[in-house]
Amino acid sequence: MFAETGQVRLHYLDHDGGGPTLILLPGLTANAHSFGGLLQAGLADHLRVLAVDLRGRGQSDAPDGLYDVATHAADVLGFMDALNIDRAIVGGHSFGGLVSYYLAANHPDRVSACVAMDAPAEVHIGIMDQIKPSLDRLGMVFPSWDEYLALVKAAPYFNGWWDPAIEEYYRRDLRTNPDGTVQAISDPEHIRAAALATLDIQWPEIVRRIGQPTLLLRAPDQLGSADVGPIVTREVAERTLGWIENSTLVEIPGNHITFLFGDSAPLVVAEIQKSVGV
């Protein structure tokens, strides 16, 4: 499904199980299908879950120009207007969590509660080193889907682990070229711009303004190799907990990617449903 925001056309998935509306925003390079593991685990059983492809990702428009957090937030507000949603729970993973923080702090009339999934409220230049493998992958052309999938499965953050729900997420992230080769849909320069823009924001000041109930979910495992620890350290998570007055911190087994799938997905679902009272 698609919604016209006034600036871009956004693609979204609508899983309506009744109850409050939860808008989910994916990570920096991800698409709406990145929440497939949570949906399979019953997230939409008592919620209307709207998972959105942010601009430049998935099937949404990918205009040249602004990819800063304020622009992404304006897109989400336009999306809500297009669907006649006055107020909703807003949640996001990683970069999507940062956009959720921004919306909750700056538009409290539109956000009833916030769910931040492994989203650091302290962002530093080291993020560019962390996302370099993803940016490199976005710029590569592969002979076939099977070869692309083999590269993904070999990523250190999976370490031999795999879940079928992840495969659909990666498949939806590809386009097939006229010659039969495949490559990621997202333009790496758009993604780079979005990442760099997060460095211009004083995130501690932003999250201190959040008054809505906020669930902080942290993945404690390192992201692959020993030199890449968890995206949100325990220390950062505890500082964020102190900055947001009405917040709860829960750790979910897994790393930044795997904790949304497999055996961890039902744990994430249970915490989200408990936090919003369904």
Image (tube, rainbow, N blue to C red):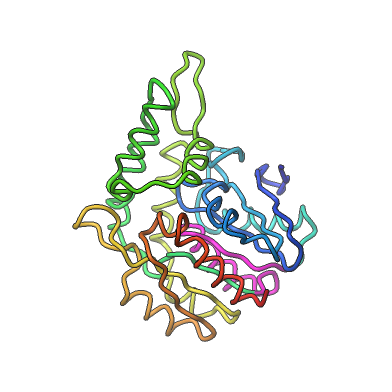
Q: Residue at x 38, y 58 (%)?
A: 256
Please state if 72 lies on the left or on the right of 8 as rendered.
left
In the displayed structure, would residue 68 be above or below residue 236? above
Magenta stretch encompasses residue 98: yes
Q: Which residues are magenta?
A: 87-112
Of all residues, the one furthest to the left in this rendering is 227
Quadrant location of the C terminus in the rendered image? bottom right
Please state if 218 lies on the left or on the right of 85 as rendered.
left
Of all residues, the one furthest to the front in this rendering is 263
Nearer to me, 62 or 153:
153
Magenta stretch encompasses residue 118: no
Using the rendered view, name the quadrant where residue 200 is placed.
bottom left
In the displayed structure, would residue 244 be above or below residue 176? below
Q: Residue at x 40, y 27 (%)?
A: 146
Quadrant location of the N terminus in the rendered image? top right
Question: How far across and how far down the image is residue 180, in percent?
Answer: 47, 16
Question: How far across and how far down the image is residue 22, in percent?
Answer: 66, 63
In the displayed structure, would residue 219 be above or below residue 163? below
Question: How far across and how far down the image is residue 237, in percent?
Answer: 38, 75
Question: How far across and how far down the image is residue 74, in percent?
Answer: 63, 57
Nearer to me, 28 or 93:
93
Q: Residue at x 69, y 69 (%)?
A: 110
Q: Residue at x 59, y 80 (%)?
A: 213
